[in-house]
Image (spheres, rainbow, N blue to C red):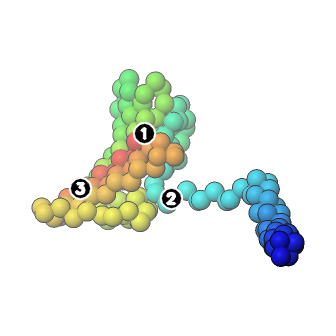
Amino acid sequence: MNRLTLHSLIRLAVIILACCIPGIATAQAQQQGQEQNPPPETPPRKVMREYQGVRLGMTDAEVRAAVGKPKSDGKDRDEYDLKDDGSLTIHYDNGKVKAIQLYFANAKNAPPWPEVIGDAEIVQNENGSKHARVVIPEERFWVAMFQNKDQSMTTITISQ
């Protein structure tokens, strides 16, 4: 009987090994495949990253090549007039664009909310104004949009 039990245990061990080895081999193959083919990167979130070719990190010379001579300039900022009572202010830090601010006196001239903040939640304030802000940590910037109750003022800020 002792011999029968030993024989049964050996047979059971062989069956278990036979079942496990293909699974181990498959897992190793999948792991090697993952190392060779990393998962695809997620596409960047759809938010405003630039305005009229001006992006964070550009030099003042690159900004002026993109949008022309500013209406006024200072050590750390350039100001431009936009069509239809709007303005563009570029803020610099160490000679590179740190923030882009837009002002629109009429909401019809401002970019639509989804183009600025993508699918982020728009918060309606008690006073009727609304705002939204999106932070993109992997790209180290944020974008925000504000509009007053009667839509006579819309501001957009893209900043590091």
Q: Position of residue 15 (x, y in %)?
A: 83, 74
Callout 3: helix, strand or loop? Answer: loop
Is 45 situated left or right of 155 in this image?
A: right
Measured along the vertical axis of the image, is residue 63 above or below residue 131? above
Residue at 39% of width from left, 54% of height from top? 134
Reading the chain from its start, which is encountered first: label 3 or label 1?
Answer: 3
Q: Which residue is mark 3?
A: 153
Query: Is tag 3's residue or tag 2's residue first in the polypeptide sequence?
Result: 2
Q: Pick the residue in front: 128 or 120.
A: 120
Q: Identify which amino acid the numbered label 1 is placed on.
A: Gln
> Which quadrant: the N terminus?
bottom right
Q: Which residue is tagged 2?
A: 45
Callout 3 amino acid: Met
Separation (CA) of disc 3 from disc 1: 23 Å
Residue at 47% across, 42% down: 140
Q: Nearer the viewer, mark 3 or mark 1?
A: 1
Give neighbour class at mark 3: few <14, some 14-19, many 20+ (Cα, 10 Å).
some
Which class describes the residues within 10 Å of circle 2: few (<14), some (14-19), or many (20+)? Answer: few
Nearer the camera: disc 3 or disc 2: 2
Identity, as a three-letter code, of the amino acid under mark 2: Arg
- The secondary element bearing badge 2 is classed as loop
Q: Quadrant of residue 150?
A: bottom left
Question: From the viewer's perspective, is residue 30 above or below residue 82?
Answer: below
The reply to whether dot 3 and dot 2 touch (C-beta < 8 Å) is no
* Mark closest to the chain's N terminus, 1 or 2: 2
In this rendering, position of residue 100 left or right of residue 39: left
**Would residue 53 be found to the left or right of residue 147 on screen?**
right
Separation of disc 3 and disc 2 at Cα? 26 Å
- What residue sits 30% from the left and 64% below the top? 122
Helix or strand or loop: what does disc 1 sit on? loop
